[in-house]
Amino acid sequence: MTVETKVTYCRICEPLCGLVATVEDGTVTRLRPDPDHPLSRGQACPKGIAFVEIQNDPDRVLHPLRRNDQGEFERVSWESALDDIVSRLRDIPRDSIGGYLGNPPAFSYSHATWFAAFMRALGTKHTYSAGSQDINSRFAASALLYGSVTQLPFPDLPRTDFLLVLGANPLVSHGSALTAPRIKDQLGAITKRGGRVVVVDPRRTETARAYEHLPVRPDSDAWLLLSMLHVIFADGLADEAAIREQTVGVDAVRRAAAQHPPEETEARTGVPADVVRRLARDFATAPRATAYGRTGSCLGRHATVVGALIDVLAIVTGNLDRPGGTLFSRGVIPVEELAERVGLATYASDRSRLGGFVDVLGSYPAVLMADEITTPGEGQLRALFVSAGNPVLSVPNGPRLAEALTQLDLMVSLDLYVNDTNRYADYILPATTWLEREDFPMGVASAAPTPFIQLTEAVVPPRGEARQEWAVYDEIATRIGVDPLGVGLLQKLAPVSTRLPVRATPRFLFDLLLRLGPHGDRFGLRRGGINARKLRDRPHGVVLDEHAATGLRKHAVRHRGHRVRLDAPALVEELARLGDRHDDDPDFPLRLIGLRELRSHNSWMHNSPTLMKGAGRKHQARINPVDAAVAGVVDGTVVRIRSRFGEIETLALVTDEVGPGTVAVPHGWGHEGGGWELANKSGGANSNRLASSALDDVERLGGMAHLNGIAVAIEAVEPAAL
Ligand code: SF4
């Protein structure tokens, strides 16, 4: 038997923890944390370690599958699958072909790039992604404030004195839209050096328990932030010099904040006015402060406004683009500039066929897909690629989307499993895991307090007949005559002197962009700069600098004069709408929020026995004892949760970790089919069935589904005596 160890890194979530794989006769048999990784230093979470079970899962799709006339999947050859797919695509107008990209491709430089380029080359509007259920509001906020949709401002954890966290739980998520390995240590260091970490959340999360918790009513962040700004302006705590130097349009924010004194927002937020005043003053007077929000703040009714206000708090207190504050993201590869140059970094450059939603990075709200498939007319969606995604489980109208998928002329999925969505596909093409492809952190690692890069080769060859996704898209594109990353596009990226291939490969593109990037060797023009060859000699990765750069505003802000724009009309209009919102509903008096679990990652890791084992490993709704008593719900029994749009049943966990009026339910559960046996047996319910799919309920600026703060009611299903 041949036994080897290979250094690589995890690509499930943002810390990208270093791992060492044991490979026996070509099979990965063990993953363990890499003690020599400069940043994660021997730490990885249970998901990274258990990934070996996904890698070797007997339920994985390892061969192309075609749905036969009996509606069952049968194994076919790649050649026959691609021949048929290509021939059917030729009969469909290109603007009727679309794609949905799940979350995992965000961690693959080749998959995400080729998918986006393929969609762009088709000239279709039908690009959808998990982003409209996750983070597009953050991108929309950046487009409005900075004129740069790809900008991902992040907290300078190692140097801050005050970290305000809204709707994020970094001790469990390990940092989202933020690459900070060993984040627990990084948060701990803030308080050890005398600083503060304040967690604003309706739930006493693991992070809130460890630091200062400020409980808040679900989906009320916008009012809390405006009240903080109100105090900062009214008390003369704003950094007027920084505002003058860095921004335009501050009066719009002043006016909006003036409308929302803490005494008036107290009823909405549940935060006493004196607490808001103290918090605002403490934030504004801290030597170095930053605010950070993630999914909890991204999925409410005013998600883009909240994303913008989180930054505004740092901006008006002089904490933007300076050590210890909120920093501008900048990749080792200048993804932002390149995406702009090739027309992929767009915001509001077009509108969706239905609903008139603006695009965010060329994509539209995924909740539209069902209607786009079923509504006739020019550009009707007729063929769909689903890449490592499970929208039937993750968008609000799952059952309706499932029904609509059956009406497509062609549906092709690239995935590891037969899941809740691609069980309706015509073809499922076997995709690679991250252990089966070379990679480097392209997009996700740009929001890193400690700039770092690691290049990894594939640890093992693809299992079965799995193929890398980029190669599949490239081949289909070539055969139908579109040019996703051909020479024309490369010419826009490369220096005149570069010898270009006819078609790009990920490796070629990576090396080219790396060398042109801020740390690159500029093809020999910059001494000591990096290139792919140098990185291969450093398999544990390279720390590029002690701290992320500051003073980047002139590079990062694309508005005129490189000034942050605080009065974008869309933002001002949305701020004005806040005053009109009255959503109390006596029939649905509680508010639903999501929560992140340590051993789950969205909808795709429920087939790992290690991650699913244990007596407490059940899908549970956290309900406050007061609300449980009113509804007759007893801990451990089944509770029915109803909204105006649907209902689910799951187990009740009666706990005061959520305040009265709040119900917290983990997302990604409730699998109802497909080939992943353990996931199907795991039970639980799909919390998104409680969400509205009405277009009026989709957030207008970022196209976000409203998944946090849904009005719900609860009732006991089993007699309380049970
Ligand atoms: S924290 Fe994220 S990157 Fe690190 S091991 Fe866990 S899943 Fe992987």
Image (cartoon, rainbow, N blue to C red):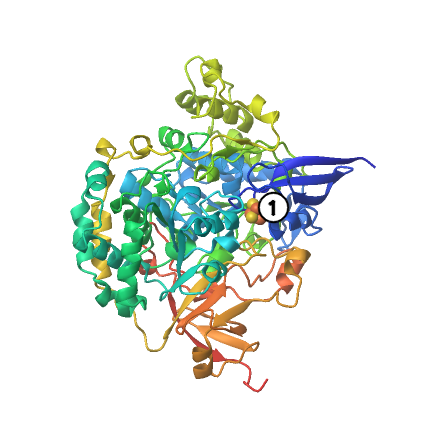
- 229 sits left or right of 177 in the view: left
Q: 106 or 487, which lies in front?
A: 106
Estimate the x, y position of residue 385 in percent, counting from the top left: 51, 44
Above or below residue 473? Residue 157 is below
Front residue of 400/171: it is 171
Q: Quadrant of the C terminus?
A: bottom right
The answer to whether residue 192 is left or right of residue 215 is: right
Residue 324 visible to an observer of this rendering: yes
Quadrant assignment, res 577: bottom left
Badge 1: residue crowd in 10 Å (few <14, some 14–19, many ≥20): some
Mark 1 C-beta closer than 8 Å to ligand 1: yes
- Furthest toward the right, the residue is 1
Residue 639 place in picture, x, y as percent: 51, 76
Image quarter of the N terminus: top right
295 is higher (above) or lower (below) than 34:
below
- Taking the spot 49% from the left edge, 42% from the top edge, the residue there is 106
**Camera-side residue of 582 and 541:** 541
Image spot of residue 499 (x, y percent): 49, 14
Determine the residue positioned at 42% across, 17% down. Answer: 495
Q: Is label 1 in a helix, a strand or a loop?
A: loop
Q: Residue furthest top?
A: 497
Q: Which residue type carries mark 1?
A: Gln
Q: Which residue is mark 1?
A: 43
Please give the name of the residue rendered at 24% of the width and 37% of the height, measured from the top-left corner: 246
